Image (tube, helix red, strand yellow):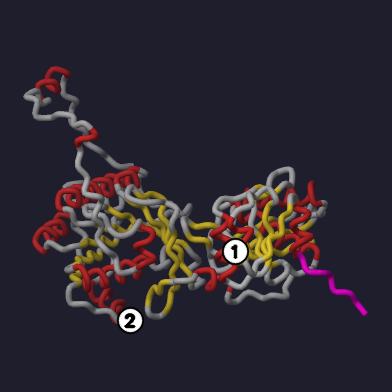
Amino acid sequence: MVETVEQPMPSTASRRSASPTDGSVQATRLADISYDGGQRIPVAMDEFSRVLGGGLVPGSLVLVGGDPGIGKSTLLLQVSTLHSATQGPVLYVSAEESPQQIKLRAERLKVVPDELLVLGETDMTQILAQIETLDPGLVVIDSIQTVFLSELQSAAGSVAQVRENTSRLMQFAKRSGVPVMIVGHVTKEGTIAGPRVLEHMVDAVLYLEGDRYHQYRVLRAVKNRFGSTDEVGVFEMTDGGMREVVNPSQAFLQERSGNAAGSAVAAPLEGSRPILIEVQALTTTTSYGNPRRTATGFDLNRLHMLIAVLQQRVGYNLGAQDVFVNVVGGMRVAEPAVDLGVIAAIGSSHAGRPVERDTVFIGEVGLSGELRSVSQLDRRLNEAQKMGFKRAIIPSTTYRGPSDRLKGIELVRVSTAREAIDAGLAAPVRSS
């Protein structure tokens, strides 16, 4: 509970008298408004710049969230050091760690630039005073839940504190044109802690996703006023910090085993980038009354739907089977184009037959077991061809276009889930 003192509402007459009536506030025709094209500030990290939409917009307020220990501070420290080396001074405000701890992390990352300024402070009034004095080209606040305003009686991290601190930073950014990036803690549900108005106030909301026990991280935009929210950036956590993954498909498939049942390759589209991923599935007789269904990196409700399709339309008896599905590498996918890869992996595990190693599955599965076409098939097939795949199982309803003239990859058009599984599984091994 937070106590809030509200000022008495002024009367209607006083509100009218306080409103300007001298004509100083006027509307402007949309056609007469000038626009310079949105000049962006370059970011010397391509994957980060891709998610932002091509760079930092002057005066923008960017919120970066993620699970504890996922690498938010490491990523922003690297962005700050690269930005200071190319664009000028950067002020990194650490409200959680001391400047000495920031120095140790920078030495571990082997980056100690001269133009990176570090401030260990939690009082927002002092922070804003330092920003006005130093006039940096970029400001990073780590984190918004640990700074406070002394004129508010509530504790740091409360609704009132978070809202007011973000408002002060937003006013500074819009007035000065200096971009500001703030770190936000997340709740157990994976959303930014604090009031929902926090996400409404900022210009962009970025989430750093991944399993802290895996090396890959995915930076995803869930809100971006100056760009698309479909782009993702892929990083690898190493001893030297976050390393950009130029070819995510190769990274996610490099440890794939070609002769194990229950593994299939799908081609989801993340923004404008197709990424090949490995989907693993395991079916086993349940030891409990109700079978378990577990999904890692895939929507559990959609998995339930696909299992029902396999039971009713394909004829698999999964009512007494535990089903486990895992997207390898810590990637989280939600696009329906992965459906065909998921049912192929489940069918492979249930039948005990591996999927053809050079086969990729692209398509959406409907409730009647039919396959539906997906968008931008050509880009997915081009990526599969670059990775050495020779066959692609695709819906028969897909239009015949430039993809049909691709050399080196065979297009197998099927209309149902049963046909897709039969076409993708390797022939059973015959005993002599």
Q: Over which residues does the magenta segment extend?
A: 425-432
Main secondary-structure element of the magenta-colored stretch? loop
> Mark 1 = which residue?
327
Viewer-nearest residue: 256 or 350: 256
Indicate the position of residue 76 as horizontal and vertical percent values. Answer: 31, 66
Image point 52% across, 61% down: which residue? 274
The image shows residue 124, relative to residue 358, as above or below, that is above
Q: Residue most toward the right? A: 432
Asked if residue 390 lies left or right of residue 88, the reply is right
Q: Is residue 348 magenta?
A: no
Position of the C terminus by quadrant: bottom right
- Badge 2 local density, few (<14 within 10 Å), some, or many (20+)? few
Q: Secondary structure at mark 1?
A: strand
Which residue type carries mark 1? Val
In this view of the protein, which residue sits in the foreground, 212 or 423? Answer: 423
Q: Is residue 408 above or below residue 201?
A: below
Crowd rating for badge 1 (residues with CA inside 10 Å; few <14, some 14–19, many 20+): many
Q: Which residue is mark 2?
A: 108
Q: Nearer the viewer, mark 1 or mark 2?
A: 1
Q: Is residue 291 left or right of residue 39?
A: right
The numbered mark at residue 251 is none
Height in image: 425 above or below 16?
below
Q: Residue 427 lies in magenta, yes or no?
A: yes
In this rendering, does residue 363 appear at all?
A: yes
Q: Residue at x 20, y 72 (%)?
A: 116
Residue 326 placement, left or right of 245: right
The type of residue carrying mark 2 is Arg
Which x, y percent locates residue 199?
Answer: 35, 47
Mark 1 and mark 2: span between their CA atoms?
31 Å
Looking at the figure, which quarter contains the N terminus?
A: top left
Q: Residue at x 28, y 69 (%)?
A: 97
How many labels were placed on the picture? 2
